Image: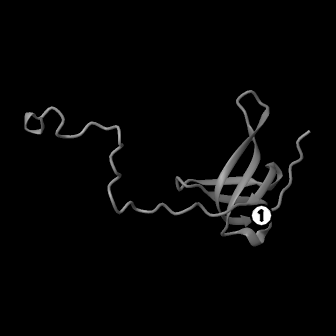
Amino acid sequence: MTRYTNRLTAADVGRRVSIRRWIDDETGGFVPSDVVGRLVAWEHGVLRVVTKRDEEVAVLERDVLAAKPIPDRPERRARSDPPAPHPAAPRDDAGDPRND
């Protein structure tokens, strides 16, 4: 049996979070679903999370199965140098008669 815990509090607003919640499936039942993003508000029993795709998701407190704060996503660093060619890659001058 899986034990779910909710480790979020209102003090976590502004942090990145992972929330497992119940959502309505198309047959009238419920299935668990995850949302990951920045918790931007928690008011009147509704948690509002903005995902990395900049979509706002509203989650009712009563639908939360498990929730916890998680680390921020690592920042992507811009590559300063082009990648080195693979050692097995053919040379540009292959087949040039001047190289024989």
Query: In the rendered image, which residue does mark 1 sit on?
Result: 44
Residue 69 drawn above or below residue 33: below
Q: In which quarter of the image is the C terminus?
A: top left
How has the structure been colored for display? one colour
In the image: residue 57, left or right of residue 77: right
Rendered image quadrant of residue 72: bottom right
Q: What residue lies at 89% left-to-right and 46% top-to-bottom?
A: 3
Residue 26 drawn above or below residue 79: above
In the image: residue 1, left or right of residue 55: right
- State the image coordinates of residue 80 (x, y, percent, origin top left): 35, 63
Rendered image quadrant of residue 97: top left
In the image: residue 27, left or right of residue 75: right
Q: In which quarter of the image is the N terminus?
A: top right
User: Regarding mark 1 in the picture, which secondary structure is present there?
Assistant: loop
Q: What residue lies at 67% left-to-right and 67% top-to-bottom?
A: 15
Q: What residue type is labelled 1?
A: His
- Residue extending furthest left? 98
